[in-house]
Image (tube, rainbow, N blue to C red):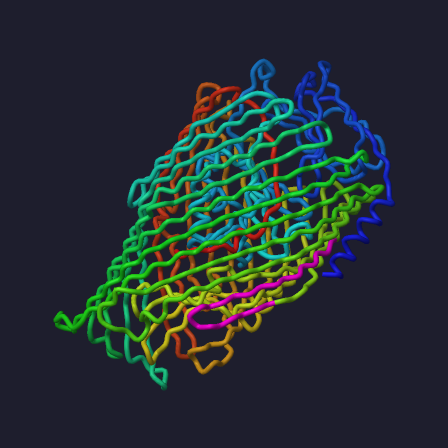
Amino acid sequence: MKNLTFVFVSVSLISSCLYGQTFKITGKVVDGQNQIIPYANILLLQASDSTFVKGTSADDNGFFELMEVAPDLYLLQASYVGRGSEPRALDIAKDVSLGALVIPLGNNELDEVVVTAQRPKLQKLPDRLVFTVENTVISQGNSWDILKATPGVIVAEDRLLIRGQNATVYLNDRKVQLSGQEVQDLLQGLSGTNIKSVEVISNPPASYDAGGGPILNIVTSKSIVPGYKGSINGSYTQAVFPKYSVGTSHYYKTDKLHLFANYTINPQKELKKTDKGIHFMDDTNSVFSQWDTHYEQTNSSQSQNANLILDYDFDDRNSLGITSNLLFNLGEDQETRLTNTMRNGLGQLDSTFTTLNNAALDNTNLAFDLTYVHRLKKEGAKISVNGHYTHYNGQALQNLSSEYFDASGTFLRDFGFDSGSEQDIDIFTGQVDYATPIGNASLETGAKISSIASENNVDFFNFTGSSDTVDPSQSDSYTYDEKVYAAYFSLVKNWDKWSTKLGVRGELTEARGISGTLGETNTQEFFEPFPSLYVLYSPSENHSLSFDYGRNVNRPKYNDLNPFRFFFNENDYEEGNPTLVPSFSNNFNLNYTLNSEYFFDVYYRDNGRNIAYLVFQDNADQTLVEFKQNVLESKSYGLDFTLSKSILSNWFIYAYTSFFHEEETFLATESGNVPFTNEVDGVYGYLANYLTLTKDGTFTGEVTATYISKFLFGSYVSDEQFNLTLGLRKTLFNNKIILSLAAEDILEKYVPTYRSQYLNQDNFYRRRPETQFIRFGFTYNFGNFRLEDNQRGIDKKERDRLQSQD
């Protein structure tokens, strides 16, 4: 802790002793015919992450002037009622006179410009990839659909992966990831019409917490022109069962107040089918029993989601931001029917059993965030203070009953029990940040404290019959408390054709977990540094070469530490692991960009003792156990190629291909505790075609295809999968009404089989959720709906480790 304090104080003292010059940028705004565009908006953005720096408006002659611009690398863009110029990169080291910024408009568009459908846009920045989807056919789905369509993102069941790593989801730089299913519920309730872009940050910089791996940051829209606009949107999805979603969004802005509010309700009924197979082996690795299980799970839920973003500018130097999110899914019913056949080693029927597993689930998550920003007299310098609180409550009641029969169908015995569980998690964080320009460089530093308290209880009761795997003694209470103290330093410097960003973050972690029934206490206390480095070299406008490095930590999710069992049937269950420890990774990436259309990436990642999802069959007890374990070692590397290019004026393609190798060595606990290395060489391909089908741009379409040869999932390897989707979008009545149609997994090939086959282990599973569907979307805009939008963000971290019982 003393080391962190020394670093933070030293950085602050050094930065306060330095100063820098400021400059001005001048220019004018015209259309494609060189006609002046008066009153256009001028936006100056950070080149590193596209965050807003300052803005102004052109005068009635189209001229503009930005004063007191600190030396740095920026992007400058002019926009007029939904149309924008191409962003222009500027390395400010002196006063700059630009000439003209060109906004392509039609002959009559200055009188009334409407926002028509656009194609998604891809932008490569030094530390992230920005995928802009606003006003595209993609945005007519929900936020979960947008993430599935984001280049480089692999969806495996309810997990989002980037280069084989679990991604952390942010909403406006606020971490929102709970358990995989809860994240999916949250994002399915947030309409895509509110989304501006998705930022793929494969190697987060020092200003982000070290935990969590790669980041998917969803940036929502925010009005920057005074006035009010609103929308009502809905969708109808036909899969096995019909589903619908209805939501409304409202924007309001005055000179001082910025307000955004959104509410969505998402009732749905979904069928998930799962096939499992296990070959139990004797000491000679010969199969003596074959189990084949078929699950049909029906989920009925009615999740609701409300968001509020409020910013108030007291004056030019002081502002206050309030953000709140409420997600609740009460009264979810989950019914699982299971049939199992057991055969001997020769394939002859031995016996069968059926299981009915009913669960009632309630989940509530409330988050509240408060940020105060004070801009100092020195141009570009500011201090921000942030406080955050999250409360999560999850409750589950389970009733499980099984009946066993011999080969002739004669009843043998029955078994059953009830269980009840509850989880309460409270998270408090406090953070202070300081940023200032220093000559032609900029410095950012800050400190943060996080406090997490988790209390969990599970009870087993009302037993019928007996079992070797579950009994009342497994009722337990588990508490987990964690505190993380952190400080960071980051420096960005630009000169000539170079741009660098380096940083270091230090985190001190203190954690304790206590199991009441087992009487066990697990404690952790450690300090770790997390350096990061980004270097960008641009010898010309058409070529750039970059390198980045970062060290990260992957902390266990709270529920993974609970030593509880959740049963699918008495022979198949998930179990927590209180001995899990954080794992540390080192990430290297080399990128070459040609003409802002071709992107080449080579990456290598040493994941250390990664926390992996492992499944082991106990051949003696004939059970299947799923849990998380620290592997012995883990690494991955690959080559990525990205193409973003217009083929014709009405045809734009985006292609992403990744050739990768992944391997993990873990302890095979049911195979004599010997190390085993699971590895795979795979290919991931994504091709998107965006088409403008009418001259006025109001009717657009897309055709996308995704292919995955195979990939690693803990002790499993998946087989290949393919997803073909189609989409259409039509705007009517000057953009007041937007209609969309999307069809996904048309060929029904996006359902892989996962197999674990090594030593004395041989089992597989294939889950079949409703990946094939047709969705109709509708949006009605009202008020001053042609207002342009900008982005906002707040940094938050700990919420991703929340996890409730699925």
Q: Residue 441 at what x, y percent from top left? A: 81, 44
Q: Residue 452 at what x, y percent from top left? A: 55, 55
Q: How many marks?
A: 0
The N terminus: image quadrant: bottom right
Q: Nearer the viewer, residue 404 or 234?
A: 404
Q: Nearer the viewer, residue 140 or 152?
A: 140
- Is residue 176 left or right of 50 when viewed as pictured? left
* Residue lying at 60% horizontally and 57% vertically, measured from the top left: 211
Q: Nearer the viewer, residue 438 or 462?
A: 462
The C terminus: image quadrant: bottom left
Q: Nearer the viewer, residue 456 or 777?
A: 456
Q: Is residue 686 above or below residue 81?
A: below
Q: Residue 424 at what x, y percent from top left? A: 46, 54
Image quadrant of residue 244?
top left
Q: Is residue 423 above or below residue 57?
A: below
Asked if residue 515 lies in the magenta stretch, the reply is yes
Q: Is residue 679 visible?
A: yes
Q: Residue 328 at what x, y percent from top left? A: 41, 44
Image quadrant of residue 279?
bottom left
Q: What is the magenta range?
A: 503-524
The chief SS type of the magenta part is: strand
Asked if residue 383 lies in the magenta stretch, the reply is no
**In the current view of this chain or complex, which residue is farthest to the bottom?**
284
Q: Is residue 480 above or below residue 285?
A: above
Q: Is residue 713 visible?
A: no
* Residue lying at 80% horizontally and 36% vertically, measured from the top left: 70
